[in-house]
Image: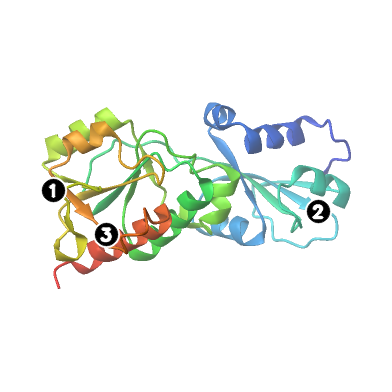
Amino acid sequence: MAERITSKTNSTLQHIRRLLTSRKYRYECRSFVADGVKLVDEALHWSIRVEALVLCDGVEFPVPEGVREIRVPPALMKDVSRMETPQGVIALCRMPEPEPFTPTPGCLILDGIQDPGNLGTILRTADAFEIPVVLADGCADPYGEKTVRASMGAVFRSPPRQIDTQTLIRRCAEQRVPICATALSPRAKDIRTMDLRNCAVVIGSEGNGVCAELLDAADREAIIPMNERCESLNAAVAAALVMWQIRNGGLS
């Protein structure tokens, strides 16, 4: 039996708003929001635990057994949803439980990728190439609404790992996984000549590049060749090129 909510001040709707706006609150609750038909379908298909579905009046959507169903009028759905044109389906999802982290050769490390659109795009590309992704310090929240949407469901299919930079460096050393940092430096080698399959490859932010800690820990550095008049590539584009090189072995 569906519940019905008609008040903006309802505690469940207030909970959703806080999940949409506060990273700290999301991690305190270990919950996040998926907004839109495709994302909710992906969450249900990939065994993400969906605690509740909020459905707009008139929208037909199959509600699995054991999932709380909430019905709201269109005006209230528009008030809660962050989409310009709400699709009338919102899911409250549980975050995957954290697992012990062990770095693997051929993984991608993201350092300081703060733009949720870029992060979501990288996760989507990594899912396509089956590249594990590790988020070091300073990255956007993979469970923020904009990142989840930009990932097109990849955050459900291939959840990224999150770990602080110092622990990441230590674990790579313990597992003997060399770190390769993308950088503009004299020792950086053309990425087209490098076999990256045995490395953990670091992509930094467009503005700051790879942080000093990871650069100091890097066993090697790589550069993506480009026109000299161009300062940098978009982080998501650079990550896609790196992942293509990882996936295909690199050596031409």
Residue 224 badge: 3
**Residue drawn 37% across the image and 58% down it:** 230
SS at mark 2 in the image: strand
Residue 239 badge: none
**Residue drawn 39% across the image and 39% down it:** 112
In the drawing, does residue 15 fall left or right of residue 124? right
Q: Position of residue 238 (x, y in %)?
A: 35, 57
Give the vertical position of 218 relative to 27 (above or below).
below
Q: Position of residue 74 (x, y in %)?
A: 86, 52
Q: Position of residue 208 (x, y in %)?
A: 37, 39
In the drawing, does residue 208 fall left or right of residue 74? left
Q: Which amino acid is tagged 2?
A: Cys
Give the spatial CA distance, label 2 vs label 3. Answer: 47 Å
In the drawing, does residue 123 fall left or right of residue 147? left
Residue 187 badge: 1
**Residue drawn 59% across the image and 28% down it:** 25
